[in-house]
Amino acid sequence: TAQFDINDIRQQFPALAQECNGQPLVYLDSAATAQKPHLVIETIRQYYSGHNANVHRGSHSLTAAATAQFEQARETVQQFLHAASSKEIIWTRGATEALNLIAQTYARNTLQPGDDILVSELEHHANIVPWQIVAEQTGARVVKIPMRPDCTLDLEAYHTLLTPRTKIVAVAHVTNVTGTRNPIEAMITAAHAVGAVVVVDGAQAVVHETIDVQALNADFYVFSGHKMFAPAGIGVLYGKQALLEAMPPWHGGGKMVEKVTFEGTTFSALPGKFEAGTPNVAGSLALAAAIKWLNNLDRDAAEQHIQALRQKALDGIKDIEDLRIIGLQPHASLFSFVVDGVHHQDIATLLDQQGIALRAGHHCAHPMMDALGLSGTLRVSLALYNTEEDVERFIAALHKTCSLL
Ligand code: PMP
C-alpha cells in the first residue's frame, strides 16, 4: 500500500545530505531540477555494470536484454501518461528537444503563410523559440495569448484569437515562474473546435499530478525526466498515433530506417522513426524507475505535504518589508517573489551563503517578465523531500538577509 513518510523519503536522496557553504543544504530549486533517489542512481549503475549493450541491434544476449528493458520502460511511460499505445511514446533528450521535434516535423510540414500559432505569454522559452523558428521557415505567425495581471491566461482573449487560421496552440500545463495551472482541458476543446492541434508542455506538471493524455485529449504532451527524479538527458514526446504516423522524420541515422539505398530510404514504423542513433538506454530505464518509485508513494499525501510547506513559507515571509509575492496561485508547488528596492540576485547570493539554494532570475520566461515589468524574481520551488526544517531555515535566512540589505 502506498505511503508517505518524509523521514524515509528524505534519507533516500544522498544529495540532500550535503553541506553547502558550511551549512546543511536547503534545496528549494526542484522546479529547475529535482534531486535523485538512490533507486534511480542505482538503476544507472546497474545498467552500466550489467546489461549495457546497444539496443535493437546485433544478436547477442546482452542486446536482447537491454532492448527488452528499454521497451518495458517505454510501456511504463505509456501507463504513466495513460497513452493508448507505446508507439505514441518517443524518447527525447528532454522537453526542449520534444518541442523542437514537433515544430520541425509536424509544424514545418503543416504550416502555410498566414497560419497562426498561438503561444501563451506564460511560457518557458522552450515553448516559444521553436515556434518562432518554424514561423520564420513557413511564413506562419506566432500570436501571443496574453496573461492577466494575476499571472493567469486571459481566456477571453484566447477565444477571440482562435480562428480557422489557428493551426497550433502551445501552452504549459503548469508554468515554471508562478506555478499557474492553465485550464488546458477547456483550451484543448476550444482549439479542436477550430481544427487546431494543441501542444502541452508538461515539464512542471508530471511530477505533481496524474496525467491522462487521452482524457485531456492532448495532441502532443512533452516532459523532461530530470524534474521528476530521473536523470537529465532523457525526456518524452507523447503524440497521438495518427499525427505521429503522418509526420516526417526529423533526425536521420541508424535505427530510424527500414531500408537505405542511395536512390532513397524508407523509414521505420513508430516509435523508431523519431529515434535516430543510439538512444540513452540508461536514462530511459532510470526514468521508468523514477516513475515506479513515484507510483509507490501516496502521491496525494506528497502533494498535501508540499502544499503545507508552501503555506508555511508564505506565512513566514509575509511581514518582510517591501516583499511582494508575484502572481500567487492556489495549490502550486512553488512561488515567486521580489523585494522592492533589492536586486533578486543579491538576495540569492546571501541566501546561498547560508546554505539555501533557490532560483533567481528570469526563469527562461522573458516575455512573462516583460509583462510583469520585472527583470527577475526569486523562486522557491518545493518537492516531496523538503521538510519543515528546510522551510524554517529559509524563513530565518530571508529575514536575516533582508535586514542586512
Ligand atoms: N518548460 C518548462 C515549463 C520548464 O520549466 C522547463 C525547464 N525549466 C522546460 C520547459 C525545459 O525543460 P528542459 O530544459 O528539461 O528541456
Image (tube, rainbow, N blue to C red):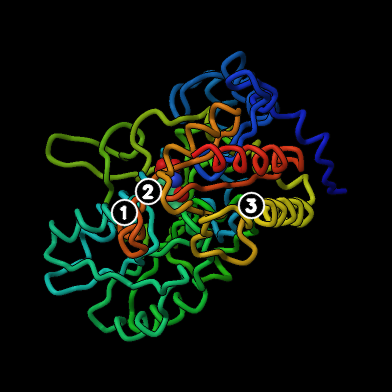
Measured in 3D between alpha carbons, the distance from the residue under mark 3 to the one under mark 2, in whole angstroms, is 21 Å
Q: Amino acid at mark 1?
A: His
Q: State whether residue 302 is above or below residue 214.
A: above
Q: Nearer the viewer, residue 378 or 136?
A: 378
Q: State whether residue 89 is above or below residue 370.
A: above
Element under disc 1: helix
Relative horizontal placement of residue 112, taking residue 148 as reference (left or right): left
Q: Which residue is mark 2?
A: 362
As drawn, the label of residue 229 is none
Q: Amino acid at mark 2?
A: His
Badge 3: how crowded within 10 Å, few (<14), some, or many (20+)? some
As drawn, the label of residue 366 is 1
Does any portion of residue 310 appear in the rendered image?
Answer: yes
Element under disc 2: loop
Q: Residue at 40% x, 78% y: name it.
A: 154
Q: Residue at 12% x, 39% y: name it.
A: 263
